Image (spheres, grey):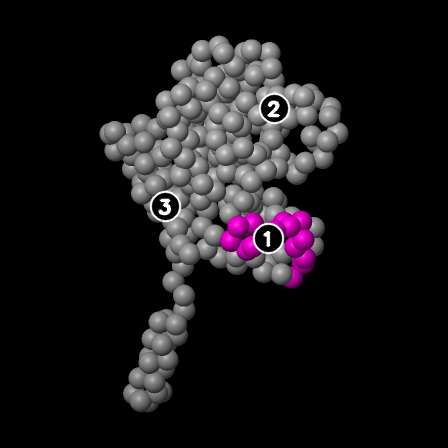
Amino acid sequence: MTNATRVLMGFFVLIAALTVPIAAHAASHTVSPGESLYLISQSYDVPLNTLMESNGIQTSWIYPGQKLYIPDNASGNGSTYTVRAGDDIYQIARQLGVNYLDIIKENGLYNPDLIYPGSDLYIPPASRAGSGQGQLRPTPQDVDLLARLITAEADGEPYTGKVAVGAVVLNRVNSRDFPNSIRNVIYEYEDGTYQFEPVMNGWIERPATPDCIQAAKDALNGWDPTNGAVYFFATYVTNPWLWSRPLSNIIGDVAFTY
């Protein structure tokens, strides 16, 4: 092989190396004293629930020196998803860790059921606030009311389930199908009945427990284990209409649906 040939081959290898995309590398973070999981999620622009799921964390408690895995592509400008046969908005959102309301809004889907195989959807970066929760300006009374509802509805459930109940209330606040404040969502009265049983039976007046107060704050800070669900009910309930709704997930003994 002549020197000229070697030079040419080296040149082409260099060009090839420069044109091959460089794979993104996942990051890791070592927890420092005083840091919170929520602040870490914000600093890396990754949804709190995604960060927790990626590290197998069930509560927001972390400790100094703990190593956290930061998922690849936590931030960015979104992506494109090609709809496949059998897909629906709710399943796509859950699969990609994005709030389904964000997909509907960004794609102008006035009827989210009308998507078809082969069509492309713009998938925005996963939101931290369930399509607008970050814009809420809750009063101390709102926090207390939300915490009291969580206590009445989910005091015996896992901590993630408590946060999920709070998230459902906030998802309703941000949905055009429900009232636009925490108080009005919780006290909504329709067709001769209240939306939440604790309002009807008076349990909503009981003081909130400390962990339910924290769960309310975590939900208000953007943690949504349901990825946008607007209904929840005990798994022993046999109501066909409730079970006909698209299922987000089941946490403890509570089902969360869209």
The answer, for residue 65, to whether it is visible in the render is no
* Neighbour tally class for label 3: few under 14, some 14-19, many 20 plus, Cα within 10 Å: some
Name the residue tied to disc 3.
45
Q: Quadrant of the C terminus?
A: top right
Name the residue tied to disc 2.
189
Q: Amino acid at mark 3?
A: Asp
**SS state under label 2:** strand
**SS state under label 1:** loop
Front: mark 3 or 1: 1
Residue 142 lies in the magenta stretch: no
The answer, for residue 257, to whether it is visible in the render is yes
* Neighbour tally class for label 1: few under 14, some 14-19, many 20 plus, Cα within 10 Å: some
Q: Where is residue 161 shown, x and y percent of the image? A: 52, 25
Q: Earlier in the sequence, mark 3 or mark 2?
A: 3
Q: Where is residue 101 shown, x and y percent of the image? A: 54, 45
Front: mark 1 or 2: 2
Q: Earlier in the sequence, mark 1 or mark 2?
A: 1
Quarter assignment of residue 222: top left
Q: Amino acid at mark 1?
A: Leu
3D distance between C-alphas at marks 3 and 1: 26 Å
- Vertical placement of residue 176 versus 252, above or below: below
Front-most of 160 and 214? Answer: 214
Front-most of 27 and 251? Answer: 251
Q: Amino acid at mark 2?
A: Tyr
Quarter assignment of residue 138: top left
**SS state under label 3:** loop
Name the residue tied to disc 1.
109
Q: Where is residue 1 shown, x and y percent of the image? A: 36, 87
* Neighbour tally class for label 2: few under 14, some 14-19, many 20 plus, Cα within 10 Å: some
Front: mark 3 or 2: 2
The residue segment tinted magenta is 104-118
